[in-house]
Image (tube, rainbow, N blue to C red):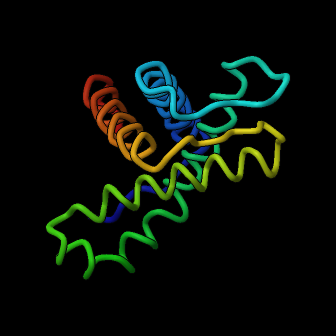
Amino acid sequence: MAKKSETPTKFLVRWIITAIAVSFAITLIPCITFNSDNSLMANIFIISMFLALINVTIKPVLKALSLPVTILTLGLFALVLNTAMLYLAAWCATSFFGVGAAITDFGSAFVASILISVATWFINTITAFD
């Protein structure tokens, strides 16, 4: 069965779910700090927008390219890939919107990316989205 294309409504729902997951992760692990005049929720929505865009466009390509390494590490490299996507989203939010998102260290970003993945999966399961 062919995968359905990403519609604007589907992307908007994915963006909101990602924003909820990012705010959950930032609340539990304050690894992402913001150095801007925007409100915290505006910053979370901006970084979530980039994270949702990256997860739809870039991440599938990187997952396919890193499949051999992921198999060799028994799936652990997928967690490192999620962390890299979080770093990329923070960089994009800072570069394009001046959010000033800074990730303190790799370990807390690693745990935050796991929390974001679990929270997104949980919300998708409850809402029957995807």
Which residue lies at the image location 32% right of the left edge and 55% below the top edge?
79
67 displayed left or right of 22: left
Which residue lies at the image location 49% right of the left edge and 53% below the top edge?
55
Q: In the figure, residue 38 lies in which quadrant?
A: top right
Image location (x, y in percent) of residue 120: 37, 34
Please name whichever residue, 48 or 110, is drawn nearer the observer in this view of the structure.
110
Please name whichever residue, 125 or 33, is drawn nearer the observer in this view of the structure.
33
Quarter that holds the C terminus = top left
Residue ranking furthest to the left: 74
Image location (x, y in percent) of residue 115: 34, 34
Indicate whether 92 appears above or below 103: below
Which residue lies at the image location 82% right of the left edge and 42% below the top edge?
97
6 displayed left or right of 8: left
Exactly how many numbered labels are in the figure?
Answer: 0
Please name whichever residue, 80 or 49, is drawn nearer the observer in this view of the structure.
80
Image location (x, y in percent) of residue 44: 63, 28
Quarter that holds the N terminus = bottom left
57 displayed left or right of 128: right
Indicate whether 119 appears above or below 108: above
Q: In the figure, residue 68 lies in which quadrant?
A: bottom left
Indicate whether 9 appears above or below 81: above
Image location (x, y in percent) of residue 24: 44, 22
Which residue lies at the image location 49% right of the left edge and 30% below the top edge?
22
48 displayed left or right of 110: right
